[in-house]
Image (cartoon, grey):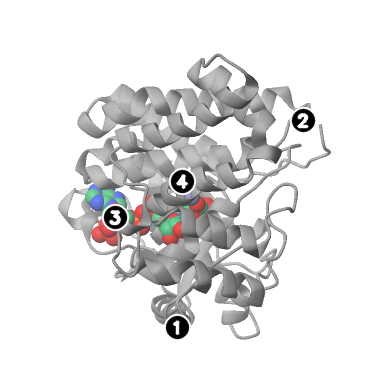
Amino acid sequence: MNNFELYNPTNYIFGKGQMEKLGNLIPKNAKILLAYGGGSIFKNGIYESVMQNLKGFDVTEFGGIEPNPHFETLEKAIAIVKEKKIDFLLAVGGGSVIDGVKFISGATNYKGNPLEILQKRLLIKENAVPFGTVLTLPATGSEMNSGAVVTIAATQEKLSFGGSALFPQFSICDPTVIESLPKRQIQNGIVDAFTHVMEQYLTYPHDAYLQDRIAEGILTTLIEIGPKVVEHPTDYALASNYMWCCTMALNGLLNKGVPTDWATHMIGHELTALYGIDHARTLAIIGPHLYTVLFETKKEKLTQYGKRIFHLSGSDDEIAKEAINKTVEFFHLMGIDTKLSQYTDDYAKAATFIAARFKERGWNALGERQNLTVEKVKHIVEMSY
Ligand code: NZQ
Ligand code: ZN
């Protein structure tokens, strides 16, 4: 196992009715910015429940953080935080609102141009404005990690950043919030979490046996509950396992001591930036082709995945290939289309465009073995048409 440090200061508060703890989690006399998205929190009662528990606090509201949050929108929030001397941020939403708040948190006290945080992928280790979250959409794991993704609308770039100062101080995670989620978002959440595990699992054999078994446990659980929770979002057992799987898939536990990939996400982000396709759906479009193009170097892990998750038999090559088919089958069962042309008619430019961007950024050798060249990226995107 590789050496590692495990640091996660987030107070993760899980279960029904946990919102009543909210007022005690925020410092007394704090001036709060309550950040939210397009307004779903007003329709499902979450806003009311938050406000009931923030009685006595000085709260400024900032809405309109869009899915795949825009730098341009977050700049406005930063101006308000500075003007009103806000000293605590509360994200109430899914990954987009939480990521948006992470950017506000890191950028408010940043001395230079906040765009640099994204363009230079700066690590935010200090001077962040403290923040907590109320999770309304299980998917990204952002509620218990220190990473985030923000889009610069002006240049259509979707860029990730993070740092040890960007863990939420607390996250209130009540599985009943999924009752108001559109099916599409539950489908997205399951497939996003599934792919988070794959990015940290489907690499090459190593001796961190426990991480493999935890990863396989999450994959198996997601396969078991995924299709059911879409149909029965009020089933608490399904909802709670869905939420916990999503957090566990990306709270920094799986990647300890093991190689990781993340190239599916890097390519997927470009598809969202170009076409506005939901994050999880871009992963379902790209992942299986990436596994195919990198078949030789991922084969051993694909075989392990095929045997342990899908109980396949045959030669290693047969199992590894069939494991990719089974993955696509699962995405389809989750109601997710896996071809780019099913999302846009303008798909033909994607491969050349993305390859050029990766080249420009010097992303010539991605993946756990650094063997994913720009040419291979182009090929993967072409295969996804
Ligand atoms: O904006 P509102 O009106 O709240 O509606 C949202 C939004 O339209 C809606 N929604 C959320 N909770 C709801 C609800 N509707 C009804 N009832 C509820 N309880 O769902 C829509 C999508 O929300 P969004 O936050 O965009 O979804 P998700 O949580 O999937 O987040 C996606 C973003 O997270 C990034 C993605 O790239 C994308 O920008 N990611 C962040 C990661 C991280 N920080 O670790 C890792 C991921 O790989 C991912 O890249
Ligand atoms: Zn993701």
Of label 4 and label 1, which has the lower sequence position? 1
Residue 302 pos. (x, y %): 61, 30
- Which is nearer the N-term, disc 1 or disc 3? 1
On the image, numbered disc 3 is attached to which residue?
A: 342
- Between marks 2 and 1, how big is the CA–CA gap? 47 Å
**Which disc number belongs to residue 206?**
2
Between label 2 and label 1, give the one nearer the viewer: 2
| Front tag of 3 and 2 | 3
Could you tell me which secondary element the residue under label 3 belongs to?
helix
Q: Earlier in the sequence, mark 4 or mark 2?
A: 4
Label 2: which secondary element: loop
Q: Percent position (x, y) of residue 161? A: 60, 64
Tag nearer the camera, 1 or 3: 3
Labelled disc at residue 171: 4
Q: Residue at x 29, y 70 (%)?
A: 64
* Residue assigned mark 1: 79
Q: Amino acid at mark 3?
A: Gln
